[in-house]
Amino acid sequence: MKQKTVLIVALTFSVLIFLSINLEAKKETTLAFVGATLIDGTGAAPVSDTVVVIEGKEIKDVGLKSEVEIPEKAKIIDVSGKYILPGFIDLHVHLTYPTRMEMMLSDTESLQTIRALRFMSKYLRAGVTSVRDVASDLEPMKAIKAAAQYSLTDTIRVFSVGEGIVTTGGHGEILSATEAADGPEEWRKAVRKMKQAGFNYIKVLPPYTAQEVRAAVEEAKTQGMLITSHCGSDVDFEPPYFSRIAVENGIQCIEHMNKIEDEVLEMMAEKHVHLVPTVGIVKHIRKFYQGREVPERMVPIDVYEASFKKAKELGILMGIGTDFVFTLTEMYPKPFFIEMGHFVELGFTPMETIVCATRNGAIILGKEDEMGTIEKGKLADLQIIDGNPLESFDVLGKPEFVLIGGRLHHYPQGLIEN
């Protein structure tokens, strides 16, 4: 009797899965965006009068209107005179952090989840289609991941590290978004805990030993996870020292930079370590201290900018990340475009900056084969804007159309928020 019951349950689930697959197949639509100028995220020159064909979740075809065959079943959307770009990627956010400090006294995981969804909605509307959350509470992040898995939400992609790993008393240890661990074996266990919770990324924070970092890197590699390190904010302990430890022991990406010694930057270039410099938040903090006593640990902005320019000169691959937290969260989505502007101020061309915001973001996420550029076979994460971003970034942040995995979001001009 028990075996019969198990068989019936298994057959029922099989039928439900079959029906679900067929229903999803019926929902798939084919879209053709016709007439826009294409900036594909690879750094190639813009191409006018193009067609981008979307079938289901993917880009089916892309090219000149004279060369691309539009399927008969396609819904044609005329976007002549507009620009089509990949969706942007913010590599440094904290979705669940309180927007007001007093919230920390009575915060709940439910409220954190709602805050995260509000943040995600703002970014969707602005053409930022993916974010990497680099430390938030586990349960809200697990809920957001599960909601996406079961199609309960229709919003941006979130790539989460879960909780940041830190030693007792280290950077951010007082926050519930970190996991305190001491010694190599505890760091290994913390990495395993994040993997068990369903995350494929790890973030570590100083102060730490070489042995702790090495253990986390080795375990992340074993678990198939990518690992990044916080190195260089104004509250770090001797930031150049920890940047060196991180790079020497296999960290794949550095968050922030403050002052990184030239020798360490050269090592980063040689080892292909990526960098998310978060220039905007550094400048914002320094504005706050204008006319006040500046903490001794705070590196002057010209030193910070010199490190940035040296990193660019060495060819270190950089991505766009913001890190505007707590009360500053209310500024979103503007911080993303402020950060892009700083990249241009510090020597990147507008096209190079767009590459940093798209393709480079996908590379840092380990998703360059799936997203980040508008190419045949990639996920259809893109945006259509009214204006040339190579002339001014002022046209960004208010797209008319946003697609995430082929799901179309239309924002008529009258709905744009100033």
Image: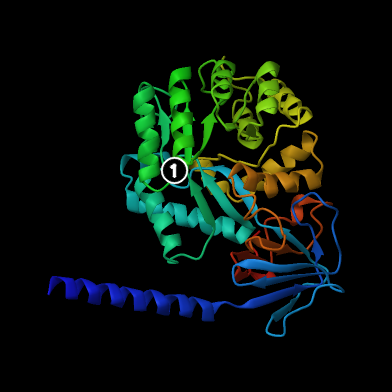
The residue under the point 82% across, 42% down is 349
The residue under the point 64% across, 44% down is 363
Q: Residue 145: x, y in percent?
A: 43, 55
The answer to which image quadrant residue 137 occupies is top left
Q: Residue 86: x, y in percent?
A: 69, 57
Q: Residue 361: x, y in percent?
A: 64, 45
Q: Which quarter of the rendered picture does the C terminus lie within?
A: bottom right
Evaluate whether residue 32 shows in this view.
yes
79 and 315: which is toward the camera? 315
Residue 105's place in the image compared with 394, above or below, is: above
209 and 60: which is toward the camera? 60
Question: What type is the residue that disc 1 sits on?
Answer: Tyr
Evaluate whether residue 178 shows in this view.
no
135 and 317: which is toward the camera? 317
Q: Residues within 10 Å of mark 1 (few under 14, many from 20)?
A: many
The residue under the point 40% across, 43% down is 195
The answer to which image quadrant residue 307 occupies is top right
Residue 121's place in the image compared with 42, above or below, is: below
Q: Which residue is mark 1?
A: 97
Farthest residue toward the bottom?
72
Q: Which quarter of the rendered picture does the N terminus lie within?
A: bottom left
The residue tagged with tag 1: helix, strand or loop?
A: loop
